[in-house]
Image (tube, helix red, strand yellow):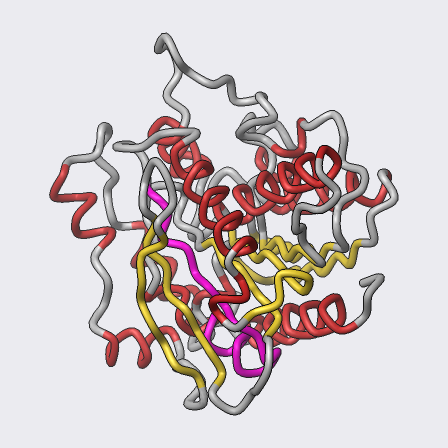
Amino acid sequence: MNRRTRLLTAANRRVPRPDPPTASYLRRGRGELPRPVSRLLLGPVARGVELVDQVLPTSPYAVPVRLYRPRRTAGLLPLVVNLHGGGFVFGNLTGADWLCGQLADRAGALVVSVDYRLAPEHPAPGPYEDAWAATCWLLDHALELGADAGRAVIVGESAGGNLAALVTLALRDRHRADPAAPGLRGQVLVYPSTDLTMTSASATALVDAPVLSRTAIEWYGRQYVPQGLPHSIALDDPRVSPLRATDHADLPPALVVAAGLDPLRDDALGYAAALARSGVPVRTVLYPEAVHGFISIPRFEPAAAQALDEVVLHTVDVTTHPNG
């Protein structure tokens, strides 16, 4: 871990997490940085990309999204659905601007970032329901947006990686029931949370990891999947832990990115192994010295640019070649 990242993570550790979180704490944590400040700290959006915010008319809840469209391209574009990270509690569209803007520019794709509802106000399955509704709407209305539903990829980071894996499994099941239903050409899971039981070796060994400690993970878990309530979802339920799904076959080619200094390292590696055992083409990339969340801090973490290269290459490859 380099010095700049060490300083950033040290500052993050000093922020206490009230349990349950107060409204003011959530409001501060979810506030979007002013765009100039965000560009300075987190990296710029490519100049050739147009940003447009809109609200999808999904049901029962309308879902806000941000579209990133490269100006220099013509014709129908590949479609990329992005699901941001934040432990299901935090995260916003501006925090994903660098990744989405760079991906739109370099892959020549229409990238749509989804602003799903957050816990604890909307615990599981609320965030998943929004991710599912938005992805289905975008696939079904891709032509209206100038995109090709036949060349669609889903990208998810951290908690968003969890949601992306779940949406991919559900789209697989929908396609099995209705082969005419649009599906995905590829999936990109960046240090995803795939098993909320946190029983992996890395979750046990890296209890005091920078950025994401075991204490922090458990706090996020209590907000997203509260236990002991009439409608509680168990942590090992496949509806929240995609690694626990009984069937990982017939899924689109995957890129799985893992960070070595991350308690979720083995969530990523374990899910990649499960996909490979089921015959899914998988490229797994591990950055041994990277921390959780590194792709969101390109100004601090050099590995972010390398991971972006991998995401772009995978997106271009699976949307260019029919068999991924």
Q: Which residues are magenta?
A: 100-117
Residue nearest the viewer, comparing 7 with 141: 141
> On the picture, is 254 further left or further right than 160?
right
Position of residue 168 measured from the top left corner of the image (x, y, whole percent):
64, 44
Residue nearest the viewer, comparing 42 with 101: 101
Q: Quadrant of residue 278?
A: top right
Residue nearest the viewer, comparing 301 with 228: 228
Position of residue 230 measured from the top left corner of the image (x, y, whole percent):
36, 8
Task: Give the residue displayed 26% in from the left and 32% down from the top.
Answer: 121
Residue nearest the viewer, comparing 59 with 117: 59
Q: Is residue 114 magenta?
A: yes
Q: Is residue 196 above or below residue 150?
A: above
Q: Is residue 295 above or below residue 118?
A: below
Position of residue 140 measured from the top left corner of the image (x, y, whole percent):
54, 53
Q: Is residue 92 above or below residue 243?
A: below
Task: Give the residue displayed 80% in from the left and 42% down from the top.
Answer: 250
Q: Quadrant of residue 80?
A: bottom right
Please state, as top left, top right, bottom left or bottom right, where the C terminus lies in the image. Answer: bottom right
Task: Give the residue displayed 53% in from the left and 47% down from the top.
Answer: 136
Q: Is residue 48 magenta?
A: no
Position of residue 73 measured from the top left corner of the image (x, y, whole percent):
56, 87
Task: Give the residue displayed 66% in from the left and 46% down from the top.
Answer: 181
